[in-house]
Image (cartoon, rainbow, N blue to C red):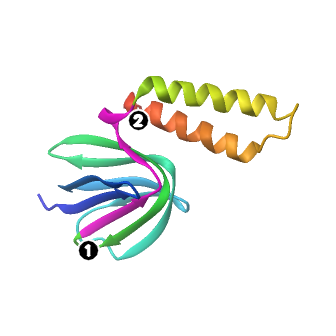
Amino acid sequence: MKTIKVSVVTPDGPVYDSDVEMVSTKAQSGELGILPGHIPMVAPLQIGAVRLKKDGKTELIAVSGGFLEVRPDQVTILAQTAEKASDIDVERALRAKERAEQRMHEQKLEHIDFRRAELALQRAINRLAVSEKRF
């Protein structure tokens, strides 16, 4: 079966680099499925999971925004943060989720940045879902 090279990179360095059969992810414009030979494109990513089909198995990477660049033989994901499902610290993600929920609740009482708390909550929920392979 044909494959496409995928690289997931963050400001801290590379997170993933391998040949896969298919890439699926959420862009700002909607869900994208990329196979070898896909037309070139660039798309901003949403907080979500990147699903990588390789050897009949699906690997998951949690990303919190960034950009996807597609070329016929390569996909590059430049993400603000990215973690493979196996690398996610579930306890830390749970604490982050609880903090974000608390901040959103307190927003009504204080001058908390609601959007910032909402994004933190989305990132924590995404990390938990990827770690539990719910995608």
**Among the two numbered marks 2 and 1 on one chain, the one whose residue lies closer to the N terminus:** 1
For mark 2, give the secondary structure.
Answer: helix
Q: Which residue is mark 1?
A: 72
Judge by depth and name the residue closer to the eye, 92 or 55: 92
Read off the magenta span. Answer: 74-88
Judge by depth and name the residue closer to the eye, 19 or 24: 19
Q: What residue do we see at 40% from left, 29% from top?
A: 89
Judge by depth and name the residue closer to the eye, 109 or 62: 109
Amino acid type, residue under disc 2 in the picture: Val
In this rendering, would 41 be left or right of 100? left
Disc number for residue 130: 2
Quadrant location, the C terminus: top left
Measuring from the top left, give residue 121's x and y in whole percent. 61, 36
Answer with the quarter of the image where residue 107 lies: top right
Disc number for residue 25: none
User: For the view shown, which residue lies furthest in the bottom direction?
Assistant: 40
Quadrant location, the N terminus: bottom left
Measuring from the top left, give residue 83's x and y in whole percent. 37, 43
Against 28, residue 42 (above or below) is below
Q: What residue do we see at 47% from left, 55% from top?
A: 80
For mark 1, give the secondary structure.
Answer: loop
Answer with the quarter of the image where residue 20 lies: bottom left
